Image (spheres, rainbow, N blue to C red):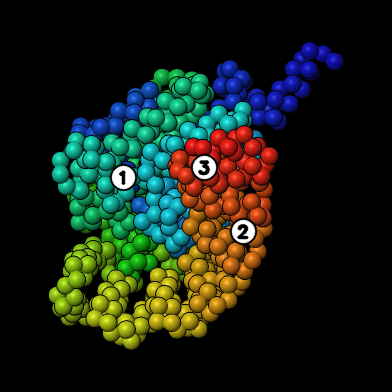
Amino acid sequence: MSKRKLLVILVLLLAASGLFFLLRRGGTGTAWNVLIITLDTTRADHIGAYGYKTAQTPNIDLLASQGIRFDNGYAPVPLTLPSHSALFTGRYPIANNVRNNGSYFLPENEVTLAEVLKDRGYDTRAVISSFVLLSKFGVNQGFSLYDDSLDTHEMIRNYKSEIPAELVHEKFSAWLGQNNKPFFYWLHFYDPHTPYRPPLEFAKRFPQGSKGLYDGEIAYTDVWVGRVIEDLRRRGLLEHTLVIIAGDHGEAFGEHVEQGHGIFCYEEALRVPLIFYAPKLFGKARTAAARVGLVDVMPTVLDLFGFEIPRAVQGRSFRSLLKGGSEKEERTFYFESLYGREEMNWAPLTGLLHRNYKYISLPDPELYDLDADRSEKQNLLLRKNIVARDMDKRLAKFIVDHSQSSGETRRELSAGDKEQLQALGYISAFSSQAAAALDPKQGVLIDARLKEISQLLSQKKTAAAESGLLQLLAENPGLKMPHVFNLQYKIYMSKRNFNAALNILKQAIDTFPDVENFKQTLALSLFDMKIYDKAEKRCREILDKNPRNTRATILLGEIREKQNRPAAAAEYFAQALGIEPQNVSLRIKYAELLITIKKYEQAVEAYNQLLENEEASGQPELLLKVALLNTRYGSLADAEQMLARAAAIKPEGKFFFNYALVLARNGKLEQALANMET
């Protein structure tokens, strides 16, 4: 066989194994790692590298100065779960059907970046720091290890459940270097999200007020981003790791009335930091002005490594921009927020970025020229009405084309398409239907008053809150918002008018059948009133529509406990653990129920699994409890290890005493005597 034929065969073999890219593009034959760091609620213009003069983000700035910084990176949604779902699937919310936090989950048939890289031999791991990204919401797909343990003291986790950046780094550092495989790691830092509570030393660095505290949270997060990078450098991994820094969405501070995020899609909510760092891959550092989106990240990573991009991916690789080139075809970006529709009963918000124009479809539509008006203060709808109507048509077509996986690119909208558009949340701003829904620009003013009323309730000023709500309803006849029902319920509860409170919840469920929170609150209220049969009925209604609702599953278990049926209760807690496997408090409860029904071996297994959690294994009282259980129904060797750890953490008599007893039972008499004397 000729040398030429041998070379061709070798190249084909290398390509099939994925090594050809490493030799051809990496230059050293060393596999490239991928680290994606997502910064929750972080707007681009509050990072030093993006021109924010008072920022204290030296570590992110350094990556930007030595990597590729995208000046115009966009999130498709100003919400955490939908934005991450788009990032990791390369597909818009209208396609992957993750439109809001909490009430959606990523379908199993969606292909994620983690799944593709895992199939290519990568070690895939993630640490997330917020409830909204728990594995039950589907973004864990493809990760061999998905650490969503959060606060071990909570059995009922909610939107307040989170962990700080320091703990995210600690978990990452413990993994690093555990095996020789190339890795894909994702670290999620939630700290910049409300409530803004930076450590005092960071809070002191900035002016008082919410914006200063927000900047303090970003500065604190930056420190731990720096520690992550230093860990990679110290272990010799940084020079062969593609590091991607991405904000999932921004944060508003009243630029367009909104405080926070979720309602509007102005620049402060959608424009996010996006940095690619890998000097050996990209060579010269540069700033890219072209508009790119989070939806483009997945195909770009796969393209860089020579891996096939799944056909259903809707984003477009910007590899040429990373290499300093340009693009012939202009990018068009879709964005949306259904938060107003689903949480407030307002008009849905959809929109499009095309060339220099940004079009927002609402009952009162908006058109901005971002090149001339970055702060979006001049609505050009009347002056450029033809452009606005063209953008509205483009938006409608974009939604139809991208909500289907058929790959079709051009066709006229049919009557069925128009029905589908409404189902997907699009109502043309130029149609008669648009006027029927409340524009969020008006709704946000009402919401501000509702928040003031809520504040009065939290201060136990029930009469003032009730008066304020009645006045608001008189000024806005026919106003129906979930928040209104919620306040009415709380007012009646504070007045101990329980029947009226239950009736309000039933009205809310009839008016907003898709708002799960009302059904859950009603079930909990019935449980507290010891009306267990009706509470159970409401739980089952919730689970019929959403089998991943942990709270309803746990409540069924609690009902069985009240009915003195511990075996049935244990079954429900086991189901809940199937939804939230890293919920430590839930596992403890399950293990305790197993002891109650005398299933000791299963209890030992449940407790031993619990101690695989790093934080749980650091609790000496828990270690003692599990060790004693192991001495009777499990492994004496395991019990010895647990008690040794407990005594090391908390050197007190009872730990040494029990440790000595187990040592003696294991035949280690001298060690036992030594510990008895401690």
Looking at the picture, does residue 672 appear above or below residue 326? below
Q: Earlier in the sequence, mark 1 or mark 3?
A: 1
Element assignment for label 1: loop
| Three-letter code, disc 3 | Phe
Label 2 vs label 1: CA separation?
A: 39 Å
Estimate the spatial distance between the alpha carbons at disc 3 and disc 2, rounded to whole Å: 24 Å
| Quadrant in which residue 482 is drawn | bottom left
Which dot, 1 or 3, sits closer to the camera? 3
User: Disc number at residue 656?
Assistant: 3
Point 67% across, 48% down: residue: 635
**Up-down relation of residue 60 to residue 266 (above or below):** above
Query: Secondary structure beneath disc 3?
Result: helix
User: Dot 2 corresponds to which residue?
Assistant: 603
Q: Residue 417 has which mark? A: none
What residue lies at 40% left-to-right and 82% top-to-bottom?
A: 529
**Outermost residue to the top:** 3
Label 1, label 3: how far apart the Cα atoms are: 44 Å
Identify the residue at horizontal 74%, vertical 17% (top origin). 7
The reply to whether discs 2 and 1 touch (Cβ–Cβ < 8 Å) is: no
Residue 192, label in figure:
1
Badge 2 element: helix
For marks 2 and 1 on the same chain, the one whose residue lies earlier in the sequence: 1
**Disc 2 packing (10 Å; few <14; some 14–19; many ≥20):** many
The amino acid at mark 2 is Ala
Does any portion of residue 136 appear in the rendered image?
no
Q: Amino acid at mark 1?
A: Pro
Q: Residue at x 55, y 47 (%)?
A: 658
Q: Is residue 424 visible?
A: yes
Count residues near mark 1 (Cα–Cα under 10 Å), then give few for <14, some for 14-19, many for 20+: many
Q: Nearer the viewer, mark 3 or mark 2?
A: 3
